[in-house]
Image (cartoon, rainbow, N blue to C red):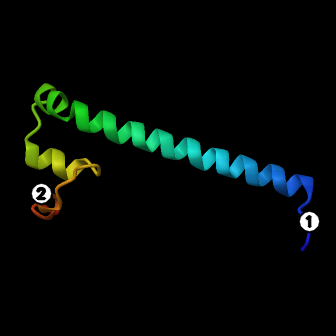
Amino acid sequence: MLEKSPRLKCVQIVAVAFLMLAGIVNYLDRSTLSIANHSVTQGLAFPLRRWACCCPHSRSRMRFRSCPSA
């Protein structure tokens, strides 16, 4: 089996660390949006149907299907 060069090992470690950080940020963003959804909707006077169209994190696909196309 071939040995990996030190530079390749470093690149792999940095790539895995970056992917883990991106996953954590994504998780925190989704959880924050799900908690703040109600207050943000009320604060912006945004109808729920419109929010579902604009927010890619909405869980209901039925809402997304009923979005206006323009």
Q: Nearer the viewer, residue 8 or 55?
A: 8
Which residue is at a point 25% across and 38% down the rendered structure image? 34
Q: Is residue 31 left or right of residue 26?
A: left
Q: Is residue 40 left or right of residue 12?
A: left
Q: Amino acid at mark 1?
A: Glu
Q: Vertically, is 38 above or below 8?
A: above
Residue 7 percent coordinates (x, y): 88, 53
Q: Amino acid at mark 2?
A: Arg
Q: Is residue 70 left or right of residue 49?
A: right
Q: Vertically, is 65 above or below 49?
A: below
* Classed neighbour count for the residue bearing mark 1: other residues with Cα under 10 Å, few (<14), some (14–19), many (≥20): few
The quarter of the picture where the C terminus appears is bottom left
Q: Which residue is mark 1?
A: 3
Q: How many marks?
A: 2
Which residue is at a point 17% across and 61% down the rendered structure image? 61
Residue 59 percent coordinates (x, y): 21, 53
Q: Vertically, is 15 above or below 28?
A: below
Estimate the spatial distance between the alpha carbons at disc 2 and disc 1, rounded to whole Å: 52 Å
Residue 43 percent coordinates (x, y): 14, 25
Badge number at residue 63: 2
